[in-house]
Amino acid sequence: MEPRGPPRPLQTPMLLAVTLLLSHTMTASVGDVRVNLTADHDRVGMGRVVALTAEARNSDGTPAACLLLPYANGFRWGAHEHADANGRAVFHIPLPNPGPVELQVEARPEPDAPERWIWAETVADHQTLWLQRAFEVPDDLMDAVLWLAVDDSATVYLNGELLGEVGGWSDVKPFADLHGRLRPGANVLSAEARNGSGPAGLLARLELTTPQGTHLVTTDEHWVTFGSQPAEWPAAATGGAPANPLGDPATSLWAGTMTDWPTLRNGRLLFTRTPLEPGAWVSNTISVRVEPRTLHTMVRDPDHLVGMQWEPWFTPHNCNWTTAQAVPVVGKFWSWDPDALRQHMIWLMESGIDFLIVDWTNHLWGKSHWDERDDSPNEIIHCTTLALETLASLRDEGLPAPAVVLYPGLNNGPATTTEAINEELDWIYHNYVRNPRFRGLFVEYLGKPLVLIHNGSGPSGLEGQAPVRDDHFTVRWQSSQSDRTRLNESGYWSWMDGSLVPALTTYEGQPEALTVSTAFFSSGGWLAPTAYGRRGGWTYIETFKAALEHRPRFLEIHQFNEFAGQPEGNGYGDEHNVYVDSYSVELSDDIEPVSLTAPAYRGNGGWGFLYLNLTRALIDLYRQARPETTVVAIASPLRKQTVRADSVRAIWNWVGVEPESFSVAANGQTLVTGLEGTEADVDLSAFPDGPVHLVLTANGTRSRYLLSDTEDSLPLEQLVPASASVDFVLERERKR
């Protein structure tokens, strides 16, 4: 769900500067890369995880710097990883389908990419910048190709003559066969770049081919920039200021959409189901047998159903992972991938989820009728149909497939009409509810299938419109931030509340609905001081306390897999700095398992399986007639945090059976025990700088689930004391 208005296109200016610098970079050739692959299992149950370790070496035995891509039976499956300094990477690969699986890892050497995005020191909306670079061309030039990308547009000149227009960072512009327009000796490249709003940058890579190899002329700090048009423009100009480098193609904020840039042509290879190409540098093959198994399901209570918000919107016209804060362990997927759908459903079934809330809130933005919808909702409808088919197939296998609640939107952005909503409900009823294949896959409430409709405006958004018909459905309205709007008092359910105490909705005096969240933003978005990040599960536990107190008829969990947000500098609001949905690993609320190390939009690596396991532990507690177990989480220090002192403030949270006390250990050494409360200073003075694994144990408690970050936890046969852990780095400030 992407609330509060339509997406706004990124707009930004770009660059090209002319410095009278007459040097080039020559690309180096790359030798063969060999990858050795090992696995922790050769036999696993359906839906379980195999841990693969890949070690990449160059032909001379040195660690290889490369992109590593896992494959299952010849098709991409699993998160991509970059080899570390030792040429090593670890993959956690879930395997949803029974049968034999052959696992391989492909190595893609990191290409030579000295180019950098550049701009002036100051970036402004509606800015125009003039950029230049002078360079030398050898006498024996054989070929020349120029690639350009710009945020937002540029007019480009070569040696004072118009070369062409460039628009957009995702639409890479190549100029081929330039050797006839270049001359031996001095040449100059110029660009008049324009920014609409938000970030701005220019990226250029000129490849000059000679008998000796390829020479590069790229955007970097040697370009010069002008705030006003030079008198000599577009010929070589004097003066100007050095360009400001903004980042390389692979890690910049523009990287997610630049699949056609010559050093980023691996973009399509990051998606699941991409076939392995002939001639690739591939590891040895690991054979794994995936066996059918009985899923570990929780006892269900028809009077207290637990639902998970779930997105079917990863399609080319909707969400394409460009601003995702992490990479799923299954890899980047389109929502029509049957293996991704099946793995999701296995995880959710074993987590005690009774129903999925399937997001259709953006289907009819600005439309008056259902038949006016375009390709964007049609892709989501297609993926929803495939999800229903997946659930039906799991049911055929005798598995307890969750049911579905569809979630259309009246005004989750540009509003539609209640007439269009009625037409949409008719379509749902005749194509889904009455379809014999999907019979029984929809939540029944008050004698009819339940449907949620998003209406952020509340009752006032319905004034002057025809009523929404409820002849086929039990209709419930849903909004967001009920802690602030108090729409729960009008019977509205909540997509997400911006409070540690979620708002309760009642019906006929009884608790009907309540929504808990792993984290939440407030009216000012994720960067507002009232937002709460994940805090290692602290926030999730705190909001869940309200669920245990009220035990509503419907408990919503926000959310499994949105992975969307606004690019940096292109948020909502006058300053473009209001970010919603997702922002970073910490400031986001998705639960789907993700890679611990794969690079994403604003960081490297995410939470692993932690929040899936927290979900299982919390729902298990929710199902207990009286509390028998305890769930704990560590809020401080954060994962991967650098601690530059001899002590750290440990902060934690718990829910369930009250612990007798708490103990803290680090790197296997008990540091303190008998702690009361939820905070303590932990002395680290005896530890050398380096990684620290801190464990908090709740004494006198029991837990049925391990809060692992490397695999999903099944119920333990023998209960253990409730505990949580976090890995951080101790790096004291060096004394002078």
Image (tube, helix red, strand yellow):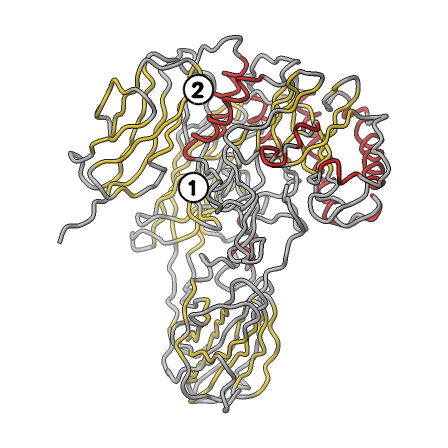
Contact (Cβ within 8 Å) of mark 2 with mark 1: no
What residue sits 52% from the left and 84% below the top? 229
Where residue 270 is drawn, which disc sits there? none
Look at the image and tell me whether residue 399 can be seen.
Answer: no
The residue tagged 2 is 655
Residue visible at 39% across and 25% down? 653
The answer to whether residue 60 is seen in the rendering is: yes
Query: What x and y, as percent, mark residue 154?
Result: 57, 75
Q: Nearer the viewer, residue 617 or 558?
A: 558
As rendered, which of 76 and 224 lies closer to the eye? 224
What type is the residue that disc 1 sits on?
A: Asn
Q: Quadrant of the N terminus?
A: top right
Residue type (three-letter) at the residue carrying disc 2: Val
Q: In terms of image quadrants, where is residue 426?
A: top right
Residue 730, image quadrant: top left
Residue that mark 1 sits on: 284
Label 1's element? loop
The percent coordinates of residue 32 (x first, y second) are 39, 56
Residue 3 placement (x, y as % from top left): 64, 44
Q: Quadrant of residue 406?
A: top right
